[in-house]
Image (tube, grey):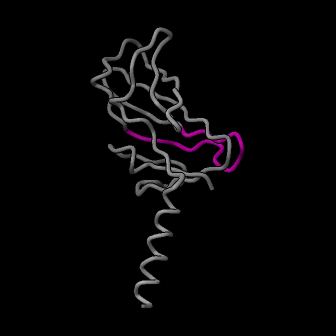
């Protein structure tokens, strides 16, 4: 019985820990729009993506993320992509956030997979 209760509590805690987890958009989700480039952000709201020059979108690969002002209501997660010329986007969070992925070292995270640089509300 005790094992069942402990297993239930651990399962609940693991679900709570990821409930608000977000990641940078996948490079494959960046697309050209009439006014520039965009990718789906948190809650599928479009994020403007800054692309250097006329980068070939299929060449873009996620490379890193950085937390900026992560302890304030002005928090932003900067997502970086490299390819022919490179691209970046900022996910404006608006509340304090922290990195939760496996590759965070302080405010910086380097990885090939955005999931390794996940973040969530503090």
Most extreme residue toward the right is: 73
Residue 82: x percent and y percent?
A: 35, 29
Most extreme residue toward the front is: 1
Q: Is residue 110 above or below residue 7?
A: above
Residue at image position (53%, 38%) is 43
Residue at image position (54%, 49%) is 107
Residue 74 within the segment the image draws in magenta: yes
Q: Is residue 69 left or right of residue 81?
A: right
Q: In this view, does 58 lie to the left or right of 87?
A: left
Residue 6: x percent and y percent?
A: 45, 83
Residue at image position (44%, 19%) is 51
Residue 11 within the segment the image draws in magenta: no
Q: Is residue 96 above or below residue 46?
A: below
Residue at image position (36%, 31%) is 27
Viewport quadrant of the N terminus: bottom left
Viewport quadrant of the C terminus: bottom right
Determine which quarter of the picture holds residue 39: top left
Q: What stretch is highlighted in magenta?
A: 63-77
Q: Is residue 17 above or below residue 86?
A: below
Q: Is residue 13 above or below residue 57?
A: below
Residue 86: x percent and y percent?
A: 39, 24
Q: Is residue 8 left or right of residue 73?
A: left
């Amino acid at each position: 019985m005790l094992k069942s209760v402990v297993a239930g509590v651990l399962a609940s805690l693991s679900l709570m820990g990821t409930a608000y987890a977000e990641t940078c958009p996948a490079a494959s989700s960046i697309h050209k729009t009439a006014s520039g480039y965009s990718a789906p952000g948190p809650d599928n709201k479009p994020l403007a993506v800054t692309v250097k020059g006329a980068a070939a979108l299929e060449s873009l690969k996620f490379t890193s993320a950085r937390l900026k002002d992560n302890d304030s209501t002005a928090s932003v997660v900067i997502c970086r992509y490299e390819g022919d010329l490179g691209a970046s986007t900022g996910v404006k969070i608006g509340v304090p956030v922290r990195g939760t992925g496996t590759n965070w070292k302080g405010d910086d995270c380097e990885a090939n997979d955005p999931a390794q640089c996940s973040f969530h509300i503090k």
